Image (spheres, rainbow, N blue to C red):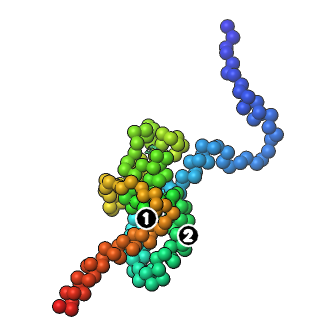
Amino acid sequence: MSEQQPAVTQATLVKKAAPKSDYKPADVSPQRRVQRSFAVRLWSIRHSRLLEWFYSRFADIFLLLHPLWKGIGYGRVEAPVKFVEKRVKGFMFDCRMCGQCVLSSTGMSCPMNCPKQLRNGPCGGVRANGNCEVEPNMPCVWVKAWEGSRNMVHGDKILDVQKPVDQSLRETSAWLRVTAQAAAARQPADNATKTGASA
Ligand code: SF4
């Protein structure tokens, strides 16, 4: 009885027929190329604690500059600030500029990258390998959010319920909005301090 030979595929024949060359492209796998496109996003999640610290200092500096923003006019500084914000956050987090940044509550994983844009945890379709059910090559945004949050000092903010996305705030600066809100929130405290001092 003769042993059955393994079938030779068309791909193998094409490969064998290709002219020999010293040049081999470094990355021809489409799957690897897709995964590589998540590399910076995943780095940011792995370094969520460092970024949490950095963001906190950065927010303090932005708040210190509130008189400057107010003097120039928040409306006037929006365009240049948004230009920088979009590029920095786009590179670091694949930010979609929803204008209501929750990165510090989601382990530095942007929930707007979830194909269903879920803001309060994963859907029921996360794959066994932790990837997304809609985009099989992409790690589930919420699996990564949980991992990132576990490294953070205030990581339990991930348990806070997030409001639905306000689409009217798309393409606006979350940095300026948070700064203006923080400045408004500390105003009653400032007034109380001044009143106490003059009494
Ligand atoms: S698996 Fe994760 S990323 Fe994909 S749709 Fe569901 S929650 Fe969103």
Give the structural element (helix, strand or loop) at label 2. Answer: helix
Q: Position of residue 169 (x, y in %)?
A: 46, 62
Q: Position of residue 172 (x, y in %)?
A: 49, 66
**Which dot, 2 or 1, sits closer to the camera?**
2
Up/down of 131 relative to 160, above or below: above
Residue drawn 35% across the image and 76% down it: 183
Residue drawn 80% across the image and 41% down it: 20
Give the spatial CA distance, label 2 vs label 1. 20 Å
Count of residue discs: 2
Instruction: Say what amino acid the circle numbered 1 marks.
Output: Leu
Q: Position of residue 101 (x, y in %)?
A: 43, 62
Quadrant of the image where one finds ligand 1: top left
Q: Could you tell me which quadrant the C terminus lies in?
A: bottom left
Mark toward the start of the polypeptide (2 vs 1): 1
- Residue under pointer 2: 83
Whether label 1 lies within 8 Å of ligand 1 gets the answer: no
- Residue under pointer 1: 51
> Is residue 46 visible to us here?
no
Instruction: Say what amino acid the circle numbered 2 marks.
Output: Phe
Q: Position of residue 152 (x, y in %)?
A: 36, 60
Residue drawn 67% across the image and 15% down it: 4
Label 1 Cα neighbours within 10 Å, binned few <14 / some 14-19 / many ≥20: some
